[in-house]
Amino acid sequence: MVKFGVIGYGYWGPNVVRNLQSLQGAQVQAVCDKSPAARQRIHRNHPNIYVTADAAEVMTSPEIDAVAVVTPVWTHFELAKEALENGKHVFVEKPFTSNTKQAEILIDLAIQKNLKIMVDHTFLFTGAVKKIKQLLQEGSLGQLYYYDSTRVNLGLFQHDVNVIWDLAPHDLSIMDYLIEKSPEALVATGQTHLNGHEDVAYITLYFPEKVIAHVNVNWLSPVKVRTTLIGGEKKMLVWNDLEADEKIKVYDKGVKITSQEGLYDLLVSYRSGDMWSPQLEQVEALRHELTYFVECISNGQTPFNDGAAGLRVVKMLEAANESLSKRGALVYL
Ligand SMILES: NC(=O)c1ccc[n+]([C@@H]2O[C@H](COP(=O)([O-])OP(=O)(O)OC[C@H]3O[C@@H](n4cnc5c(N)ncnc54)[C@H](O)[C@@H]3O)[C@@H](O)[C@H]2O)c1
């Protein structure tokens, strides 16, 4: 039984607590939130869980093996560091930290103390991303050409970070997982309209082997869109995460270009074959992820979404901010 303390019971914290409570191998020992209203909500939803306003109580409790940090990004480093220093494994929300230096310190500390860090890159545990990974690994799509994601909606405005730090970690962690290569450079553009942080932004990432990725993130969209296009040499797919069924559609479409000796014109042929929608696993991603974290702790295994994976995403976010500040200058990673 892995005993957890959870810090932060705002929007996302309740999902972490509910899922941990439902696992066979885990138990939530205490939940901490600075806000009295949040503490009342914990009491109401989980009358048997110990509630506190003082994070130090969770950090130093000998009853607790692992701490989940579900607070705003600017607090992740201090809270995760304190947990590691007190010998606790750490589950920390995305984005891992506010900068690469902090991420490196936490990774070193976890190694020194022989503790696990898992960064909550929830999408990696969805049926959709698992299926796309499988299609790429078995070569169904052929050589990858591009990844193009639109992740827009109205709000929720964050007070401490821009829309890139809020929404793009999802896409960046998915790309990191699917493409399995680090980008060479990126360009980010955006604009600030309301609260001093960019609320509309576009990132273009250049990966090795001519793979290009684009992410459109926006808090000022009248409609919610969660659509990703992934194009390969053999097949292309559309992933609409808002679809209840048939979230992924794989199209047997492609283009072939040949040139014949003696002909100046290129011969272009288009292929338009069948479309199919693969069956996806239906388990709640966070439940899957937390089950895996408990297994990693119990078996001494390093999670694939560990601190190093969190650091790779933070590097891209940091580079995106640098490019934004220079109105879209190319930044090498
Ligand atoms: N994985 C996902 O899909 C996903 C979804 C939403 C949010 N998140 C992440 O979860 C984190 C929290 O986001 P949120 O939307 O729940 O934020 P939120 O502001 O709704 O909630 C944060 C809570 O933490 C509490 N808190 C802050 N500092 C604290 C401290 N030092 N000690 C105790 N309590 C403290 C606040 O009182 C608040 O109740 C962020 O890092 C965010 O990026 C992840």
Image (cartoon, rainbow, N blue to C red):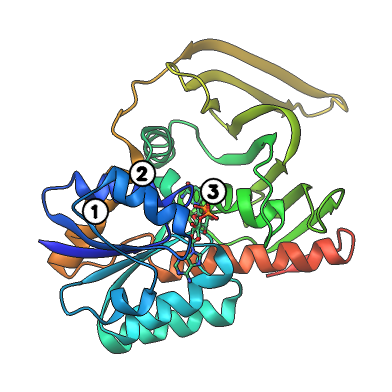
CB-based contact (under 8 Å), mark 2 and mark 3:
no
* Callout 2: SS: helix
**Left or right position of 301 against 211:** left
Indicate the quadrant containing the C terminus: top left, top right, bottom left or bottom right. bottom right
Which numbered disc covers residue 170?
A: 3
Q: Is residue 236 visible?
A: no
Q: Which residue is mark 2?
A: 125
Mark 3 CB near ligand 1 (8 Å cut)? yes
Which numbered disc covers residue 64?
A: none
Distance (Cα) linking label 1 and label 2: 10 Å
Image location (x, y in percent) of residue 319:
71, 67
Callout 2 crowding tier (Cα within 10 Å): few <14, some 14–19, many ≥20: many
At x 83% / y 53%, what residue is drawn? Answer: 189
* Callout 1: SS: helix
Which of disc 1 and disc 3 is earlier in sequence?
3
Q: Is residue 277 visible?
A: yes
Callout 3 crowding tier (Cα within 10 Å): few <14, some 14–19, many ≥20: many
The amino acid type found where label 2 is placed reads Phe
Callout 1 crowding tier (Cα within 10 Å): few <14, some 14–19, many ≥20: some
- Residue 264, quarter of picture: top right
Q: Which residue is mark 1?
A: 292
